[in-house]
Amino acid sequence: MSHDGPPSRRIGILGGTFDPPHLGHLLIAETARVALDLESVLFLPAGEPWLKSGQRITPSAHRLRMVELAIADNPDFCASDREIRRTGATYTVDTLRELRAAYPHDTDFYFIVGSDVLDQFHRWKEPEGILELCHLAVIERPGGPADGVAALAERFPAAAEAGAVLPVAGPRVDFSASDLRRILAAGQSVRYQVPDPVAEYIKQHGLYQE
């Protein structure tokens, strides 16, 4: 994914349901941005994530708006409705192909994930294709396998040798959107866990109430 000539653009991608977006998402994105010298980080709320099929998910318009509010004060972050505009199940490889076609050919994409997803990565649609389209920037998270990066490199040796799997050192982020939904359903405070504008939006629209 490197090119001869002038330096390429380096774009980070942080996908997820963002239900709701919390400070852990922002900290992970900023950690990757600084560590990898990224031009920007693109937040991509998922439309219908196939791994969460059958689960109740907040309508996409609310999730996108919460992301926009969460990142509004950071000029290096931007939100995209690319996945929520797509009908049917959302797959990372399809999104990456769309982004590859939309951005200049010399763009390097860095898909940011927590280490806790590594043991499921081989179940994603076309994992080899994902690793051909982007670098996988792995940030350690509580609950992630201690040898997750090594196990991924063993499963996809060619991609690992090409530098497609990049461990990123950073703070251990222990935020859980599912925990936040339970806290909100109980009417408790999520201050210092989600950005204040997001907390206010949740309150205004009565989200996550039983």
Image: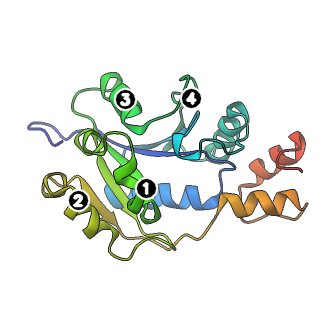
Looking at the rendered image, the quarter that the N terminus falls into is: top left
Q: Amino acid at mark 1?
A: Val
Residue drawn at x 35%, y 22% is 102
Residue drawn at x 73%, y 40% is 58
Considering every residue shown, the one lying at the far bottom of the view is 146
* Separation of marks 3 and 1 at Cα, in angstroms: 17 Å
How many residues crowd around disc 3 within 10 Å: few (fewer than 14), some, or many (20 or more)? some
| Labels 3 & 4 near each other (Cβ < 8 A) | no
| Labels 3 & 1 near each other (Cβ < 8 A) | no
Query: Can you tell which of label 2 and label 4 is closer to the viewer?
Result: 2
* Separation of marks 2 and 4 at Cα, in angstroms: 32 Å
Which residue is under mark 2? 155
Q: Position of residue 195 (x, y in %)?
A: 71, 55
Question: Taking the image as drawn, is residue 37 in sight?
Answer: no
Which residue is under mark 4? 81
> Taking 97 as reference, is 134 above or below it?
below
Which residue is under mark 3? 99
| Labels 1 & 2 near each other (Cβ < 8 A) | no
Residue drawn at x 37%, y 29% is 99
